[in-house]
Amino acid sequence: MKAFMTILKIKTKMDFRSSDILITNYLVPILFFLVMGAVFTSIMPETKNTLIASMIVFSTTMGATIGVSASVNELFTQDIRKTLVVSKVSFLKLIFSSILSGIFHLLIVSTIIILVAPILFDATSISNVFIFYGRIIISTFTIVLVGVIIGLLSKNTAQLTILAQLIFLPSMMLSGIMFDASLLPAILKNVGKLLPATQSFLLLTSSDTYIASYGPLLIMALVFILLIAVLLQRLKTLERQ
Amino acid sequence: MIKVNNLVKNYDNKPVLKGVSFEVKENEIYALLGPNGAGKTTTLECIEGLRSFDQGSVSLANKTPHQAISAGLIGVQLQSSSLFRNISVLEAMEFICRSQNCDVSYDLLDQFDLMDQKNKKYKTLSTGQKRKLHLALALAHQPKILILDEPTAGLDVQARATLHKQIKQLKQQGMTMILASHDMSEVEDLCDRIGILLNGNLIKEGTPLEIINEVKEHTILKIKTSEAINYKDVKALSFLSQQQDYDVCSTDNLHDGLAMLMQWFNEKNIELLDLIIEKPTLEQRFIDIANKEGV
């Protein structure tokens, strides 16, 4: 536990120092929120009801697929990986601390959006803080897992960029955060449902309090966790060939 | 302490190690010497448990490499050791010590002159500082065996000398070390025994002196005398050439050659003006061996 707490503390600090994380988790999402918040609410006043949810989904998707993925990828580059193995550093603890650190940073941005949106854009405030934060945590957790998978799958920066964009761009276009997903052709609507961003947006805008509304994201998270376990095992095997 | 027996490793059916065997005794510094691609790093990575091997066995204090890592028996400085760009020196020490389940070794940072850099980020450290940090990290859990791959590669003269001093101190403290290098002077200066690795074969083993002295005709004598000499009369010497005022000869037995030469000078009343003895270096010897093996 002591080892894990040290790794978590250091990982969170490293992420605060990372210019990549600063840009992808903070600067771009906040800038996007400020610009798009003004645009959306002026041309489509009804978006005030979903502005907080859509901007949170945008921020978390960008932070996770582009920021967290790069940060995880750096942790496991070949030279560092070898150093970690001979130093008895647990890959699992490192991944877990990356997930927690990612969630922590993305929650900060989400909180900024929650606090600022009603003041600047007259966005509808959240009604139940606890339930809404619970939903944000589940959504962010699932999306961060996607970032971890991208980071573990990519062998180099080029692959990382391609994979991140392959998830990020469809998430923006098909999840309903930019425009109403019901306007999409059926096939794209169905593809969109497979994206964590879509399910997150549905959860954050849902007035349902049934536990079943959490189902799709929880199932996705479970699948992603299994995939991460397989990828970690693959990393260990690759090392010894 | 370290036993490597008949180690065979293939990469894509291409043999890299072809049955390497050697032993490193307790408190010994053993060097694997060889050109690039000889198999030094692969051998070390098999010992470190980073690489599987196709045949043979490796034991460290009667444990497998993985058991040895788990038991904290070995410290490793890799040729390409690296860490996270944004981690500070102090955090790196905390990170590794906690992972190794030992107390944080601030003393080591002091010992390796890294305390002044404790808040510096890894990405801003010089190559020498990174090497020192990785050595300090490798020693953090007080291992019994230290494995160093090209420990001074890329270091300037001063940093190299400092690192050599620290390696010698570790030996005095009882550490067993194995290192890979292609720096002959480093190996000659630091190591008790050497194994020469060429094309995946360990073709020679011994102390630096044993390996140097194996071919004795390489001891060169440069002799300057008051008058010309016919070296046919001095049987222990072979005349090679004349360089400026010096006669260049070689001998396969320095002691006998010199004794005979001095006696002959006395008998003939020849005055010796200057004598330069050039012992063969490990580098020359290594080149000879490599040439002989067709490398």
Image (spheres, rainbow, N blue to C red):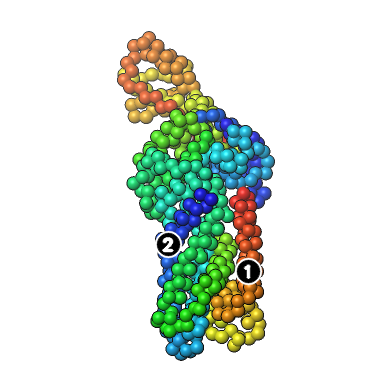
Q: Which residue is mark 1?
A: A218
Residue B235 lies, with reference to residue A235, above or below; the image says: above
> Are marks 1 and 2 in one subunit?
yes
Q: Nearer the viewer, mark 1 or mark 2?
A: 1
Q: Chain of mark 1?
A: A
> Disc 1 marks which amino acid?
Leu
Seen from the viewer's position, the closer of residues B139 and B216 is B139
Seen from the viewer's position, the closer of residues B246 and B173 is B173
Mark 1 crowdedness (10 Å alpha carbons): few <14, some 14-19, many ≥20: some
Asked whether residue B147 is in view, the answer is no
Please give the name of the residue rendered at 52% of the width and 68% of the height, measured from the top-left corner. A64
Question: Left or right: where does residue A240 sit relative to residue A55?
Answer: right
Q: Which residue is mark 2?
A: A16
| Residue A2, image x, y percentages | 51, 49
> Disc 2 marks which amino acid?
Phe
Please give the name of the residue rendered at 61% of the width and 46% of the height, measured from the top-left corner. B51
Q: CA distance from mark 1 to mark 2?
A: 28 Å
| Residue B136, image x, y percentages | 44, 42
Q: Secondary structure at mark 2?
A: helix
Residue furthest to the top in view is B267
Res B152 → quadrant: top left
